[in-house]
Amino acid sequence: NAGVTQTPKFRVLKTGQSMTLLCAQDMNHEYMYWYRQDPGMGLRLIHYSVGEGTTAKGEVPDGYNVSRLKKQNFLLGLESAAPSQTSVYFCASSYTTGGYVLSNQPQHFGDGTRLSIL
Amino acid sequence: KNEVEQSPQNLTAQEGEFITINCSYSVGISALHWLQQHPGGGIVSLFMLSSGKKKHGRLIATINIQEKHSSLHITASHPRDSAVYICAVAGGGADGLTFGKGTHLIIQP
């Protein structure tokens, strides 16, 4: 049982390049999230998904796109990387029982992807 | 938007000391999470609570909903407890958590 797996773990890009970060979970969780972590700041939500085929914007969505074509995978794309997107990216997933209270379940995090944009 | 404040930002203590990390938030929540991030970077969920107190081993988490405040305590601290401890709050919707900036804890032998 691998939990939440992020690939790649490290990547260096040049400004303007594109790339996709992959998050895969094997816990059959409905909810998945992409966060970024920057020095001196708390983690911030980029995009999230409440189920296969659905995505929504979080706090800092600009410059990113996401897709959830399969329940177990949540992809984060950078179409044209910028130095401001240098960060550590974390994916998380959580279970839901359905109903109103949706985020009151522990979130399971991946190990992070360290991305540098030159 | 909920504002989550943690204190202290940095804490260095001797092995065996009792540790307290505080978290306050500005808007009512449905749950509060305590997370641990080790130097390797991985993040682990320690507690999720919406009222009262929870205990797991040497870790204790409390929350006062009326005061909008939570504390994480570590008893008999050990160098392996050295990590960043992060408080995060859930608003009840699906839109993830709002995080504090974390408390960097170092326990010296």
Image (cartoon, rainbow, N blue to C red):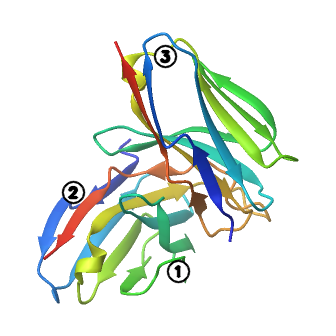
Q: Where is residue A109 in the image (x, y as percent from the top left)?
A: 44, 51
- N-terminal-most mark, 2 or 1: 2
In this view, the mark in front (3 or 2): 3
Q: In this view, does B64 lie above or below B16?
A: below
Q: How far apart are marks 3 and 2 (CA)?
A: 31 Å
- Mark 3, Cα crowd under 10 Å, few <14 / some 14-19 / many 20+, is many
User: Chain under label 3?
Assistant: B
Across and down, in percent, residue B22 comes to 64, 39
Please give left or right for residue B65 compared with residue A53 in the image. Answer: right
Residue matched to label 1: A55
Q: Which mark is residue B77?
A: 3
The residue located at (26%, 76%) in the rendering is A20
Amino acid type, callout 3: Ser
Label 1 close to label 3 by CB (< 8 Å): no
Eye-nearest disc, 1 or 3: 3
Residue A9 numbered tag: 2
Name the quadrant containing residue A67.
bottom left
The amino acid at mark 2 is Lys
- The answer to whether residue A87 is above or below residue A77 is above
Disc 2/disc 1 C-alpha distance (Å): 23 Å
Q: Can residue B18 be seen in this view?
A: yes
Asked whether the viewer can see residue A51, the reply is no
Please give the name of the residue rendered at 71% of the width and 40% of the height, measured from the top-left corner: B70
